[in-house]
C-alpha cells in the first residue's frame, strides 16, 4: 500500500514564529486525511506520515494531524526511506534526497532551474521528481496549478502591504473635516497575482491602474474596475507570458509608465517569470520622478525584482519613496496558502491512485511535462539544457 | 498683525524615515496658506512661519511651504518668541514653552492629564493653552474634532494591520483549488476608530462582529454590515462614552466576548478613554482560548491597552496568538492625518480671526471648555483637579 510522507520544510522559521521563512506545509490535516482515504478507506496502519512540527508555522499542530484518520506523526527523519511518495513545498536540502528510497516520487515546488544539486541527487538516487512549477497551463490542470494558487495569496498580501505602508488612505473618506480623495495605485503585471492585487486595492476603494504589456489583459483588468495604462504596444506571447520587446517599444512603454508612476501613491509590481530573472520595469530614474511618501511593493523581489532599487527581504528608502522587497509572501497567509497548495497536490495525485497504489502515467498531459527526473535520467528537456549550460 | 508659528514636533522620528515617532505636522502647506489668507490677503511679510523640517515626515518639504503665499520657513528656534499663535500636534517639550512670548496662544493635542510639567510652564509664562482633546462633542464642533479625525485614521490603519498580520485571507475567495471562507473579525469598541475599523474590514470582505457596551452603537454597526455581539448588558453613558459596570454585568459580558473571540481570526480593540487608562477588556485567559494564528491589534496600546498582554510598541506572541501594540498610529498616514488635523485647527481658529488679529472668545461653547491655562491660571476644572491630586 502507498506510503506518503510530508517533509518538514528545510527553510521553516526558527522557534520564534515572528521570524520569516517558509511557513507553509505541503498537506493540511484535512487534505492529509482525504489523501489517506483515497489510498485506503480501511487501512490498518497510517497511510500519510507527517514530520513532527511540519505544520506548526501554518498553525496546524501535530495533534491535529494525529487526530486525523489515516495520518500519523513521525518524531524523526529515520522513516523517510519507507515512503514511496514524498511531498514538500520548497525544495528539500539535497542531503535529504539521500534519505529517500530509490524509485520514490518527490513532488513539490522544486525550483528546477535553480536546484542543480538537488536534481543531480534525484538523478543519482533514481527519484521521480515532479515539479509543481511545471504544471502546464491547460484548463484541466487549473485545480492543480500551485503557481496560480500561491500567486493569488501573494497578490492579495502585497496589496495589503502597499495599503499598510502607504502614507495616505486608499479609500475616499468623507469626514467632518473634509473629503479625502482615494489613493492612486498602479499594479504592474496583470497575471494571477496582479489581478488579485488589483481586486484587493479596489476593495479598499483605491483608484487602480494596471500596466501589462499583454493587451489581452485589458478585459480582466477592466472587469475588476481598474483601468489599463495605454502604452500603444502589444506584447502578448505564448503560454500567457509576455514576449521580448524591441528597444523602441520598451522606451515608449517606459515613458507611459513613468508618467503614471509620478502621480501614484502606491505601486505593486508582480511581473515574475518562473525560472528566469524578473524583468526590470521600474528604473532608478522612474523612482526619482515619484512622489515622496509613495511606496513600491515588489512581489518579484525574490527573482531579482521589477524595480531597479529593490533589495529582496529589505525595505529601501530613496528620495522619500519606500521600496519593499518581500520574500516568502505566500507564507504570510500560511493557513490558506497551505490549504490551497494541499488541494493542488490532491487534485494532481489522487486520479493516479488505484487499488491503494500510485500509478503515475508519464504520457499524461499534466504529469509528463512536470516530471524532471526519472529512472536516473533528467527527462525534462528545458531543465536538462539549463543544467548542461550551467555545467 | 497675527503671527502664527508651527512647531517642529518634539517626538519626530530621527533622520531615517523608517523609525517610528510623531510624523504628523500641525499645518500642511495648503492649510497654512489658507490660514495666512484668513489673517491677511495682502500682508507684506509672511503670516505663518513653519520650522524647517517640520513637515518632512509627512512628506511636506520646506520648499512646499516656502512656495505658499503668506508662509515662510524658519531655520532655527530663535523666532519662537515672536509668535502670538503657536500650533503643534503633540505636546512640546516643557522647555519649549520658555521660548514662547508671554500671553501667546498654544494649540495642540496637549494631553492635559499627562502633561503636568508642560501645564505648569504654561501657567508660569501666562500662555493661553488650548487642548484639542477637549473640543466638546457638540455638532457645531464636529469639524474641529481632532480626536475624531485622528481616530478615523487610526481605526482604518489598525484594520489594515490586522488584515496584514492575519494568517488567513479576509475576503471569501473562489479559486480553482476551492473556496476559502471569509475571515471572522471582531472589533471591540464602536466609536469613531472602531467604526472605521469595521468599515475597513468589511471592505476587505471579512465577516465582522462588533463589541460595544453601549447598546446605542448597534444601529451604526449594522449600517456597516457588521453584527453586534449580544451580551444582554447596556452601558450607555454621557458624552458618547461608556459608564462603569457592576461586577456581574462585567462577567456576563466577558463570557459573551470570550466565546466570540475563540473563533476569531483577527481582533481589533479600540476602547480608549481620553485622559484615562484604557479599560482592560481581553484577559489573558480569553487570549488562551483563542485560535493559534489569530491576531489582536490593540489601538489602545498607548493608554495601557485593551488586552492584558499588550505591550505598547511591541508585538507579543502568546500561544500562537499575535498581540500587536501599535503606537503613533495616526502617524502611519502622515499626509492625510496632518491634513485633517490642520483642517480641524483652521475650522477652530479662523472664526476668531478679525481684522488680522486673533480674538478668542472664552465664553464660546468650544473655546471655553478646551482652554486649560490663561493669564497665569489653570482655568480647566478637571485638569486643575487632576494636577492637585497628583501633587
Image (spheres, coloured by chain):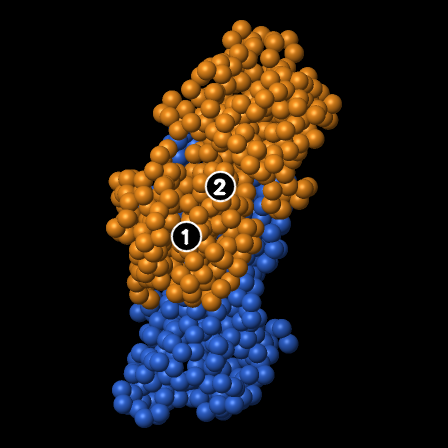
Chain colours: A orange, B blue
Whether residue B304 sits left or right of residue A352 in the image: it is right
Q: Residues within 10 Å of mark 2 (few under 14, many from 20)?
A: few
Judged from the image, the secondary structure of the residue bearing numbered disc 2 is: loop
User: Disc 2 designates what residue?
Assistant: A276
Mark 1, other Cα within 10 Å: few <14 / some 14–19 / many ≥20 = many
- Considering only vertical position in the picture, is A141 above or below B365? above
Residue B229 vertical placement versus B156 (above, below): above
Q: Nearer the viewer, residue A365 or A312?
A: A365
The residue sitting at 43% across, 84% down in the picture is B73
Pick the front one: B335 or A193: A193
Residue A281 tag number: 1
Q: Does label 1 or label 2 sit earlier along the sequence?
A: 2
Which of the chains bears the disc numbered 2?
Answer: A
Callout 1: chain: A
Looking at the image, residue B167 sits to the left or right of residue A169; the answer is right
Q: What residue lies at 36% left-to-right and 87% top-to-bottom? A: B47
Residue drawn at x 35%, y 71% as measured from the top left: B343
Which of these two is toward me, A208 or B229?
A208
Q: Position of residue A326 (x, y in %)?
A: 52, 49
Amino acid at each position: 500500500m502507498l506510503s506518503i510522507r510530508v517533509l518538514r520544510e528545510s527553510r521553516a522559521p526558527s522557534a520564534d514564529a515572528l521570524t520569516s521563512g517558509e511557513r507553509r506545509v505541503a498537506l493540511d490535516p484535512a487534505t492529509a486525511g482525504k489523501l489517506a482515504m483515497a489510498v485506503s478507506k480501511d487501512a490498518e496502519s497510517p497511510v500519510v506520515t507527517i514530520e513532527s512540527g511540519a505544520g506548526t508555522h501554518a498553525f496546524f499542530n501535530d495533534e491535529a494531524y494525529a487526530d486525523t484518520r489515516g495520518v500519523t506523526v513521525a518524531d524523526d527523519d529515520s522513516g523517510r526511506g519507507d515512503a514511496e511518495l514524498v511531498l514538500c513545498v520548497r525544495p528539500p536540502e539535497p542531503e535529504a534526497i539521500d534519505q529517500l528510497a530509490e524509485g520514490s516520487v518527490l513532488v513539490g515546488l522544486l525550483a528546477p532551474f535553480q536546484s542543480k544539486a538537488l536534481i543531480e541527487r534525484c538523478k543519482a538516487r533514481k527519484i521521480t521528481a515532479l515539479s509543481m512549477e511545471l504544471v502546464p497551463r491547460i484548463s484541466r490542470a487549473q485545480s492543480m496549478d500551485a503557481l496560480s494558487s500561491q500567486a493569488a495569496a501573494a497578490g492579495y498580501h502585497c496589496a495589503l502591504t502597499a495599503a499598510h505602508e502607504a502614507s495616505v488612505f486608499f479609500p475616499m473618506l468623507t469626514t467632518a473635516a473634509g473629503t479625502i480623495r482615494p489613493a492612486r495605485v498602479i499594479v504592474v503585471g496583470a497575471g494571477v497575482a496582479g489581478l488579485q492585487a488589483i481586486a484587493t486595492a479596489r476593495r479598499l476603494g483605491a483608484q487602480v491602474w494596471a500596466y501589462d504589456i499583454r493587451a489581452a489583459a485589458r478585459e480582466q483588468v477592466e472587469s475588476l474596475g481598474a483601468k489599463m495604462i495605454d502604452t500603444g504596444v502589444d506584447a502578448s506571447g505564448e503560454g500567457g507570458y509576455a514576449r521580448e520587446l524591441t528597444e523602441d517599444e520598451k522606451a515608449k512603454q517606459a515613458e507611459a509608465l513613468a508618467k503614471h508612476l509620478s502621480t501614484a501613491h502606491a505601486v505593486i509590481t508582480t511581473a515574475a517569470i518562473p525560472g528566469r530573472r524578473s524583468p526590470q520595469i521600474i528604473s532608478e530614474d522612474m523612482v526619482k520622478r515619484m512622489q515622496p511618501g509613495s511606496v513600491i511593493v515588489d512581489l518579484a523581489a525574490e527573482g531579482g525584482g521589477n524595480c531597479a532599487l529593490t533589495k529582496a527581504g529589505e525595505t529601501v528608502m530613496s528620495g522619500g519613496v519606500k521600496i519593499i522587497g518581500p520574500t516568502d509572501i505566500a507564507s504570510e497567509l500560511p493557513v490558506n496558502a497551505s490549504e490551497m497548495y494541499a488541494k493542488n497536490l490532491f487534485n494532481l495525485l489522487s486520479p493516479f491512485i488505484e487499488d491503494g497504489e500510485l500509478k503515475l502515467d508519464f504520457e499524461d498531459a499534466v504529469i509528463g511535462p512536470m516530471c524532471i527526473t526519472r529512472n536516473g535520467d533528467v527527462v525534462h528537456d528545458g531543465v536538462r539544457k539549463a543544467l548542461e549550460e550551467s555545467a
